[in-house]
Image (cartoon, helix red, strand yellow):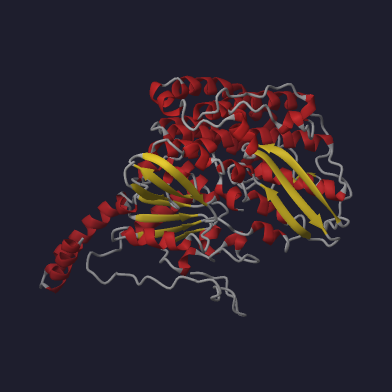
Amino acid sequence: MTEQTIVNIGPSHPSTHGVCRVIVTLDGETVVHAEPVIGHLHRGIEKMAENRTYLQVVPLTDRLDYVGSMYANWAYCRSVERLAGIRVPERAEYIRVIVCELQRIASHMMGIGSTGADTGATSAFMYTFAQRDHVVELFEALCGARLTYNYVRPGGVSMDLPDGWVEQCRAFTAQHPPVMMEIDRLLFGNVIARARLKGVGVLTPEDAVGWGTSGPVARGSGVDWDLRRDDPYSVYPRFDFQIPLGEIGDCYDRARVRLWECVESCKIINQALDQIEPGSVHAEGLPRLLAPRPGDAYDHIESARGSLGVYLVSDGSPRPYRMKVRSPAFCNLAVLPLLAEGHTLSDLIVIIGSLDPVFGEVDR
Amino acid sequence: MAFVDDLGAALDKTPGGGIILTSLDAVMDWSRGKSLWMMPMGTACCAMELIAASFSRFDFDRHGSIPRPDPRHCDVMVVAGTITRKMAPAVKRLYEQMPDPKWVIAMGNCAVSGGIFYYDTYSVIRGVDEFLPVDVYISGCPPRPEALQDAILRLREQVATDSIVPGRDRQLNTILPTPGSPRKGDSAAADGDDS
């Protein structure tokens, strides 16, 4: 036992994936305790929602998880639809599934790329970001925005698929899995990456459940839990897909689960594109100003980071009385002190990256 | 760059020194403008576009602008994202750690004016120009990487007009907004124009 030093990482540090500050107590190079300090991006979105109409909240939800905006859009809209009893046309549900699976790919590309960058291989970022740019282009054709889409609306989606979009989307899903195989070989087959990732930050299944983690973090530990299958929503029961699981719950497993989820997402998109039929993309006869009956509603979806839920309380006025976001990134980040203990400082960076937190969602 | 500052001041006072000074200025501005290293102060959504700008598709290296995580290496701070009251002291401190000459690009509506978080929120600073001298503003939520590219080129134009003679020292607005102090735009005549 030597004298302990305290090292402050962040809030502006390229490896903390946002504005997280971590106070690390070190014994030599070994982490004794790592304490994440959050709130540097607290923008008060939940409070702001109380001053917006139900439709005006949708752009705010874009800014929650800015790597996967579609998810927050969808989770919020599902809550509103549950609260107001809106039926969504089938075509809109299919479009939502397609865009959200594309979003999962875009988001995981960021996560896998940063795993590479954290272990010293910035070139992995080049490969994954090229893929991400394809998805972003598809979204831009769809709704005109590259990041903040405001596409999923209560009652459906804002507009129908443009001409030629389905073909573009099919072209993407055809070329994407081979690239994933290549990244699997280049990054996860690499000796250095394996040495940096394997056995680092092991999260046991008991802890994964006990700390409320979800998404790839929980599935990396072998917890077989995916809302798309276990609490099926929208049209997900009609698709055939696998839930990739990790074995021991280290950084390697978490990163690889993300990679295989991208391949599964391509399968879902292809099936959805096969099954989708023409029709309306927005519920008919919705008032411009929604004022649901007093009550509350909670709905959750499987976002790229895990179980993303939105709880809404209505007092009968056109504005939500309260909006609460159950943020998966926040819950996943909570296990950081648990995972980092006993590892070296350089491994701490890899562990933060493998949890893939997005601070817009952590801090809200 | 104390040596350059002294040299500039000395040349300015020497008869006939102006000719050397202008030539020296041209060389300095040329070299500074072509290697504007970025301090990526990415806090929120705009950071994603800032990252995208550095990678394969947009490739900012060709403009000589590479992101460096250390403020001591950087010439231009790109503030990309919402700055909250909790974050502002860190941003200011990082700016102070950058060596002169230094520039600031406010990328995105949040950094320009608070953007979508201008109203109804208690924690967001309405524009990074409340405490940093901003040279180039980019609107958009978030702006495209091409817009950032344009900002870098505009900044290069501005750098080309700089002189090595001291006097261009800009006064830093050192008063950080504290909780409870009136924010920009809180007055009755709220003018949204930041520039």
Tell me the quarter of the image containing the N terminus of chain B: bottom left
Q: Is residue A312 above or below residue A1?
A: below
Coordinates of residue A97 in the picture (x, y in percent): 73, 34
Q: Quadrant of residue A160?
A: top right
Q: In the displayed image of the protein, which residue is found farthest to the left?
A: B15
Q: Is residue A214 visible?
A: no
Q: In the displayed image of the protein, which residue is found farthest to the front?
A: A1
Residue located 58% across and 61% down the image: B115
Coordinates of residue A286 in the picture (x, y in percent): 86, 51
The foreground one among A59 and A353 is A353
Coordinates of residue A215 in the picture (x, y in percent): 63, 34
The foreground one among A185 and A221 is A221
Residue located 39% across and 56% down the image: B77
Q: Is residue B34 above or below residue B168?
A: above
The foreground one among A321 and A335 is A335
Residue located 72% across and 64% down the image: A51
- In this rendering, position of residue B39 left or right of residue A236: left
Total labels: the figure holds 0
Residue located 85% across and 58% down the image: A291
Coordinates of residue A266 in the picture (x, y in percent): 65, 25
